[in-house]
Structures are given as C-alpha cells and as structure tokens.
Amino acid sequence: MFEAGDIREWRGHDVVDASGHRVGVLESVYVDTATDQPFYATVTVGLPTRRRLVFVPLAKATVGPGYLKVAYDKDTVKKAPAIDTDGELPAAEEPAVFAHYEIDYTPGAGGERRLARR
C-alpha cells in the first residue's frame, strides 16, 4: 500500500489506466479516515475551460517513471463523481463515489466522514 507522503510526490504527474491510456493529472489524495491510508486520488480531467476533479481508487495502483497507473479503465474514471478543481467533496456525496466503483461504503461509528483530503 502507498504511504500518503509517497503518493503526494506524484502530484502533477500523469495518471494512466490499466491499459496505459492517459486519464489526466494527479491532483490530490484522499485518505480513509479509519486508517489514514491513501484510498482515492483525484485526477484533473476535461478541457482547459471545463476542468474537474474525478475520484479513482488507489487499490492496486502502481507507479512508473513519471506516472501513476490505476486499476480502472479511462471511461470508468472519467464518468466517476467529480468536484470543481477548487472544490471539496461534500460528506453527503461520499457514498456515490464508493458506489461508482462498487466499493462498500460505511461511515464512521458516529457517522463521521470516510474520506479526508491530504
């Protein structure tokens, strides 16, 4: 598993899908609040005047020379829930991010958020 500090070093590098197709650029990392381990990355996609950040799980992601390779195909990632490039993920929208990738979602015992931006 990636350490949060390590994955941040790849900010600004290309993100590619499992087939090597460029998806976008790594913007930030969201950690699982229960473990403080990197769980999702946000990737900048879209045209220069319509950029947005989409979420992609970091499970099974690998790094190569100048890129981060994720386990999901480009189309799946580009259709993922998104936020504005200067936005923050609202707590109410967290379940949709998990559902898009068919990952179980369970908030904290007291209803706390599952994801935190680092």
Image (cartoon, rainbow, N blue to C red):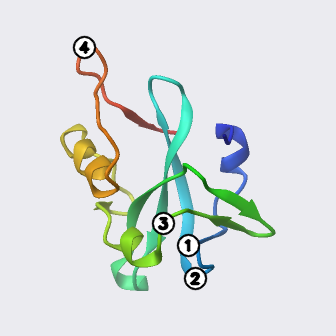
Q: Name which residue lies at 70% across and 39% down.
A: 5
* Above or below for 26 versus 22: above
Q: Outermost residue, right direction? A: 65
- Where residue 64 appears, as percent x and y from the top left, is 77, 66
**Label 3, residues with CA under 10 Å away: few <14, some 14-19, many ≥20:** some
- Where residue 2 appears, as percent x and y from the top left, is 67, 42
* Residue, disc 4: 110
* Above or below for 44 versus 117: below
Q: Residues under labels 1 and 2: Cα distance?
A: 5 Å
- Where residue 61 appears, as percent x and y from the top left, is 62, 56
* Dot label at residue 17: 1
Q: Nearer the viewer, residue 38 or 62?
A: 62
Inspect the image, locate mark 2, and give the three-letter code of the amino acid beneath it. Answer: His
Among numbered discs 3 and 2, the one appearing first in the sequence? 2
Among numbered discs 3 and 1, the one appearing first in the sequence? 1
* Residue, disc 2: 21
Mark 3 in CB contact with mark 1 (< 8 angstroms)? yes
